[in-house]
Amino acid sequence: MKQNVGVIDLVIRSILGIGILAYLAKDGVFHPGSVPGIIVAIVLIATAVLRYCPLYQFLGFTTSTPLDRSA
């Protein structure tokens, strides 16, 4: 898996994922109707942690910049 999620994208995905989970658990418990939201939040957090998004690869898109190692 080649990384295709950049730093800014990573931060946005992390904040959104954690925010969605926090909103859904605001009463201290997840309700059965919140399963789609939980899945979305977990996918956002997982793609941020792995720095890989399958949809980006399918579309040939990347927000990650290659490192310049010529020194």
Image: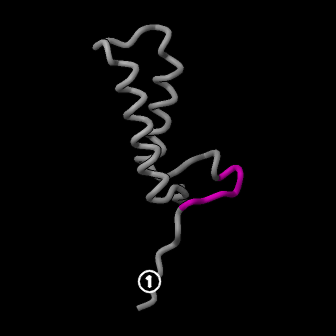
Q: Is residue 29 left or right of residue 55?
A: left
User: Which residue lies most toward the left here?
Assistant: 28
Q: Which residue corresponds to the image point at 40% horizontal and 47% vertical from the top-left?
A: 49
Q: How is the image coloured?
A: one colour
Q: Is residue 21 above or below residue 58?
A: above
For the N terminus, give its image quadrant.
Answer: bottom right
Counting labels gives 1
Q: Residues within 10 Å of mark 1 (few under 14, many from 20)?
A: few
Which residue is at a point 69% across and 57% down the rendered structure image?
Answer: 60
Residue farthest to the bottom?
Answer: 71
Quadrant of the rendered image containing residue 16 = top left
**Position of residue 28 measured from the top left corner of the image (x, y, whole percent):** 28, 14
Q: Where does the image place residue 65, in percent across and percent down from the top left?
A: 52, 69
Residue 58 within the segment the image draws in magenta: yes
- Quarter of the rendering occupied by the C terminus: bottom left
Most foreground residue, 31 or 43? 31
Q: Nearer the viewer, residue 48 or 27?
A: 27
Classify residue 57 as left or right of residue 26. Answer: right
**19 relative to 34 in the view: left or right:** left
Residue 19: where, in percent of width, then height? 39, 32
Is 4 drawn above or below residue 40 in the view shown? Answer: below
Which of the two residues, 4 or 15, is positioned nearer the viewer here? 15
- Indicate whether residue 29 is drawn in magenta: no
Up/down of 32 relative to 26, above or below: above
Please tell me which residue is depicted at 50% across the width and 9% down the height of the picture: 33
> Would residue 30 be found to the left or right of residue 40 on screen?
left
Q: Which residue is mark 1?
A: 69
Question: Residue at point 50% right, 25% down?
Answer: 39
Q: Position of residue 62 (x, y in %)?
A: 60, 59
Which residues, given as a range, are shown in magenta? 57-63
Q: Amino acid at mark 1?
A: Arg
What kind of element bears circle 1? Answer: loop
